[in-house]
Every structure is written in structure tokens, then in C-alpha cells.
């Protein structure tokens, strides 16, 4: 059924796992994700960004998710607005069938973030919808906004209680060193291991711990949590693509976060990489193909296997539906 995240977060918090929140932009992406979640009996969050609504249209996306809910009656699915930029966008999704919205006023001063978030929470709760808010800013690219590493900032644990109390938000996204996109760290920010492979700087688990101490039982969200699988980066680069130094968050760190207070882990870039790598390879191997079904079918299958791996091996939410 289509649900809010309240119940799934409570179970995830108590069970020491996290729910996967995967971004959707078209039918094949919805199908790949939901087929994996159905087979692995995992609770699921499908999330839609402002950019996704601009690309595919609100109604198409809602109807695709409603179709998935019909096809997967045995798992709970939440439909979530990712990075809602303002009250109007949140309202439009609340009125238009979403069960959860994020208001992202994290780039605003603390007081303004509280005011905007509070307004969204009041409207959302009146309509049975839950709200994710954000404190701290991630580096990286989301929609048209590009936050440079030096302008990003970790969440300040001393602010979280006041923020959550004053806004009434239902979950909180925090910045502990993850970032959006396929280039999460520059080579200069990384070290190299004995094999010469880049090793990213560790996430700030101390910040997560401080936050959780101040908000016992409260669900924490991690954005920018793609691991940027190097097999897909390699496939892309070997088949005409050019993605040098693409790098993500090590899955061990995500696994650890999922065991703690983190209840929602956002993944988009890995889906894009799986799809693009598969389609690039397909065209190199089958240069005569021109029926979209010929390349979208393996692309959808690649998304499904990627998501299955995340559910079982990283998030720990397989079998929890
Ligand atoms: O946070 C960003 C998500 O990956 C969504 O990306 O805004 O390009 O749809 P998008
Ligand atoms: P990635 O770019 O790491 O997949 O992050 C996605 C995200 O945070 C969506 O809100
Ligand atoms: Na958790
Ligand atoms: Zn995000």
C-alpha cells in the first residue's frame, strides 16, 4: 500500500536498518526499483525531485508510483518529494498525492529554516503527510544548485533539538560529509591505498552520534549516499563515456550508518550510473539496435540488481516489509 514513512522509520530505528529512498524519473526506473523491493520484501521510498517533476510531469510520476503500488500490494511504499525548494512546491505535492515531503531550507539562516519548515509541517500534518527537513549543507550538485566543498558545512548538533521542537518535523537530514552526484570528493580530498586506489575522507560519525544523543528515537536521513560503483564507472569509460575520478561513499560506511539512527538513505546517482553504463555497453555491442525496448530492458534489469544489492547488503531492509 501507499503509506507515510512513520511506521517504516519506527521499525527501522528499532531494528537497526535503513529504508532506501530511490529517485524516480521514468517508468523503467520505477519498475526496476519496485521489482527488487517486491522480490526482497523491503519497505520502500520512491522520491521525486523538482527536476523530476519538470522532466516527467507530476501526474505521470504519481500514476507510475500508483501503478507500482498496485503491482506490489505486499510492501509499504511511500511517495516523497525530494528537496522541496519552497512551501508552494510542498503544498502542490501534498495536495497531489504524495505521502511525504522534504522542505529543504538548509541554505537559509537557522531562523528562516525554522519558519519555512514549520509552515510546511503545519500544512502537511493537517493533510496526513509527513515532513523531512534539513540542517547543515551538503557539497555537490542538486538541481541547478552547485555547492562547493568549502561552502558546505556539517550539521551543528547543538542546534538540532531546538530545530526539531520548533518545527515539528518528522525526520531530519544532516550533513556529515556525504555529497550529491558522482564526484563526491576531489582526488585532493582523498588518500591513496597500497593499490593506488583513491580512498575518500571518512564520514563524521561523531557528528551523527552527537545528533542522535540529543534526539533519541528520532529518524535521521542521509542524502548524497550513492557509492558510485567502480564497475559501472569502468563500463562507462570503456564504452565511450568520460567520467574520470568519479567517486562515492564506501558501502561499509553506509552499512554502519544504517545500523545507527539513520533510517532513510538517499540514492540517485548509482541508478543513473547503472542505467547509463548498461545502455552505453549495449550500443557498443549492438550498434544496429534502435528499438528503445532493446536497451531499456537491460537498463531496467541493471537498476533492479543494483537496488537488490542495496536492500540486502547495505541497508539491511530486505525481508522487513
Ligand atoms: O539531490 C539530488 C537528486 O539526485 C535529484 O537530482 O534534482 O537532478 O533530479 P535532480
Ligand atoms: P546521490 O547523488 O549520492 O545519489 O544522492 C541522492 C540524493 O541525496 C537525493 O536527494
Ligand atoms: Na537505522
Ligand atoms: Zn539529496
Image (cartoon, rainbow, N blue to C red):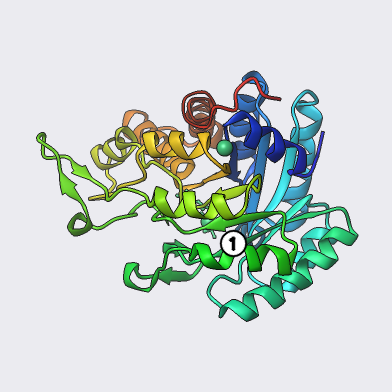
Q: Residue at x 53, y 25 (%)?
A: 308
Q: Quadrant of residue 138?
A: bottom left
Q: How many marks?
A: 1
Quadrant (top left/top right/bottom left/bottom right) for the N terminus: top right
Q: Residue at x 64, y 38 (%)?
A: 30
Q: Quadrant of residue 316?
A: top right
- Residue position for label 1: 51
Q: How dense is the environment of label 1, judged by Cα within 10 Å: few (below 14), some, or many (20 and up)? A: some
Q: Position of residue 132 (x, y in %)?
A: 67, 57
Q: Quadrant of residue 270?
A: top left
Relative side of 209 to 190, left or right: right
Q: Position of residue 128 (x, y in %)?
A: 87, 53
Quadrant (top left/top right/bottom left/bottom right) for the C terminus: top right
Is any atom of residue 134 visible in this view? yes
Q: Residue at x 74, y 52 (%)?
A: 100
Q: Please tell me which residue lies in front, 15 or 57.
A: 15
Relative side of 131 to 83, left or right: right
Q: Position of residue 108 (x, y in %)?
A: 56, 78
Against 86, is 6 above or below? Answer: above
Against 110, is 263 above or below? Answer: above
Is any atom of residue 180 visible in this view? no
Mark 1 CB lies closer than 8 A to ligand 1:
yes
Could you say whether the residue bearing mark 1 is in a helix, strand or loop? helix
Against 166, is 303 above or below? Answer: above
Q: Position of residue 158 (x, y in %)?
A: 53, 66
Amino acid at each position: 500500500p501507499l503509506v507515510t514513512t512513520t511506521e517504516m522509520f519506527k521499525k527501522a530505528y528499532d531494528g537497526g536498518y535503513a529504508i532506501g529512498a530511490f529517485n524516480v524519473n521514468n517508468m523503467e526506473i520505477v519498475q526496476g526499483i519496485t521489482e527488487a523491493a517486491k522480490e526482497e520484501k523491503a519497505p520502500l521510498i520512491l522520491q521525486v525531485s523538482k527536476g523530476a517533476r519538470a522532466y516527467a510531469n507530476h501526474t505521470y510520476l504519481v500514476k507510475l508510483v500508483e501503478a507500482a503500488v498496485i503491482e506490489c500490494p505486499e510492501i509499504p511504499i511511500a511517495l516523497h518529494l525530494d528537496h522541496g525548494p519552497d512551501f508552494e512546491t510542498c503544498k502542490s505535492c501534498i495536495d497531489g498525492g504524495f505521502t511525504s515531503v522534504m522542505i529543504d531550507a538548509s541554505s537559509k539562516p537557522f531562523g528562516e529554516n525554522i519558519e519555512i519548515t514549520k509552515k510546511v509541517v503545519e500544512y502537511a500534518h493537517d493533510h496526513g503527510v509527513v515532513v523531512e527537513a534539513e540542517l547543515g549543507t551538503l557539497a555537490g550538485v542538486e538541481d541547478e544548485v552547485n555547492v562547493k566543498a568549502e561552502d558546505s558545512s556539517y550539521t551543528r548538533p547543538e542546534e538540532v533539538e531546538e530545530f526539531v521542537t520548533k518545527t515539528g518535523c518528522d525526520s531530519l537530514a544532516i550533513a556529515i560529509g556525504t555529497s550529491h552526484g558522482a564526484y563526491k570528493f576531489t582526488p585532493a580530498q582523498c588518500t591513496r591505498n597500497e593499490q593506488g586506489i583513491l580512498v575518500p575522507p571518512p564520514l563524521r560519525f561523531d557528528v551523527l552520534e552527537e545528533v542522535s544523543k540529543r534526539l533519541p528515537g528520532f529518524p535521521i536521513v542521509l542524502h548524497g549516499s550513492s557509492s558510485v560503483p567502480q564497475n559501472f564507472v569502468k563500463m562507462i569509460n570503456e564504452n565511450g563515456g568520460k567520467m574520470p575520478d568519479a567517486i562515492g561513499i564506501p558501502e561499509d560506511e553506509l552499512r554502519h550508518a544504517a545500523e545507527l539512527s539513520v533510517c532513510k538513505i538517499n540514492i540517485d546517482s548509482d541508478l543513473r550510473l547503472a542505467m547509463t553504463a548498461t545502455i552505453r555497453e549495449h550500443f557498443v555491442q549492438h550498434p544496429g539496435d534502435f528499438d528503445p525496448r532493446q536497451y531499456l530492458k537491460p537498463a531496467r534489469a541493471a537498476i533492479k540488481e543494483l537496488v537488490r544489492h542495496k536492500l540486502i547488503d547495505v541497508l539491511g531492509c530486505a525481508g522487513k516489509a
